[in-house]
Amino acid sequence: MKLIDIISYLESEDYATKMNNIINGLQYLGNTVLEAYKVWDEWFEKAAPKLEKIISSISVAGLSEDEKQKLKDSYTEWGKYGWSYNTTSRYNDFSNFPISLEYADEFMGKYCTDEEIINIKTKLSECELNINDLDEALFCFQQGKYKSCVLILFSLIDNLLIRRNKTFIDKKDKKVKVRLGGSAIKAVKEDSESDFEKGILFSHLIFLNTLTCLSKIFEYGNNFEDQPKIINRNFVSHGMYEREVSRIDCFKVWSALYSFAVIYPTVESYQVEIGRMEV
């Protein structure tokens, strides 16, 4: 099942109604969460037939500590290779530990199609992002101008990070300098990590993968002494990236933007609702 199908389900009004019913039911059912889901069988057949299996297969209760840690390590490692989810990804794509960068690029490279980029751009157009920048990024990608494309995409990720960090500052009512780049990503991680660690494994895995991926592609340049193997915002933006930006490099940044703008906020909201289910 595609991850985007799960995300669409989590964003639906039907989901909100059903979740409220489940929360009320859990007051009596205690930890028997899956039993509560069974009353949805008929509805699931129409809306998301495999969701119950997905939740049960990746739930904390259904896995040993060793299995949970292996999943966390795997999702983190995929992020270190610059990979995060796209609209065609299946929920379990990152369940197996990638043995090398070459393996990871080949495995995820199958999703790198013109149609997929258009799908990502369409979903991003529904977010609070500059539509002209998205149009230009798509045009550059289609023309094979991958360096120009990633520069625009990096700026859009920067935009999300800046706006999110300004929200942190406003909440704390402090006049401090807004964090940028890797520092901003670190702030996002520090602000949310404890909540995700206490939540269901599915949300935590998305958190780990997305933030690790962003941290990698925004990694500090270290005085630009060693060329990075993974596409890097600082090297590209400062003209220090020696190799040609490839189609795969570009796809990684498209995916990172999509994961952070679309998937991450959804699982973050979902995590808040799951927190209400504790009995």
Image (tube, helix red, strand yellow):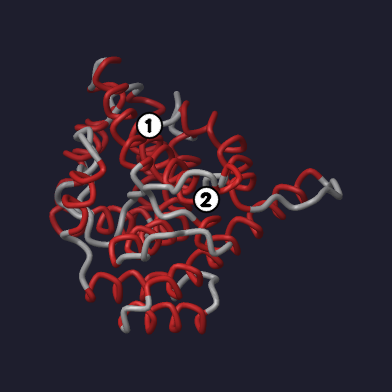
Q: Is 66 or 232 nearer to us in this picture?
A: 232
Which disc is residue 200 wearing?
A: 1
Position of residue 143 measured from the top left corner of the image (x, y, whole percent) = 32, 84
Which disc is residue 76 wearing?
A: none
Three-letter code, disc 1: Ile
Element under label 1? loop
**Residue at coordinates 23% horizontally, 75% vertically from top-left?**
114
Q: Name the outermost residue toward the top.
A: 65
Q: Relative to residue 36, is residue 132 drawn left or right?
A: right
Q: Which residue is mark 2?
A: 218
Position of residue 247 measured from the top left corner of the image (x, y, whole percent) = 29, 67
The numbered mark, 1 or 2, whose residue comes first in the sequence reads 1
Task: Determine whether 140 is above or below 209 in the image.
Answer: below
Element under label 2? loop
- Alpha carbon distance from label 1 to label 2: 27 Å
Please tell me how many numbered marks the rendered image carries.
Answer: 2
Position of residue 52 measured from the top left corner of the image (x, y, whole percent) = 20, 41
Task: Determine whether 124 is above or below 194 in the image.
Answer: below
**Residue at coordinates 16% horizontally, 59% vertically from top-left?**
110
Task: Determine the image quadrant of residue 56.
Answer: top left
Q: Nearer the viewer, mark 1 or mark 2?
A: 2
Q: Name the outermost residue toward the right.
A: 175
Three-letter code, disc 2: Phe
Within 10 Å of disc 1 (Cα), the crowding (few <14, some 14-19, many 20+) is some
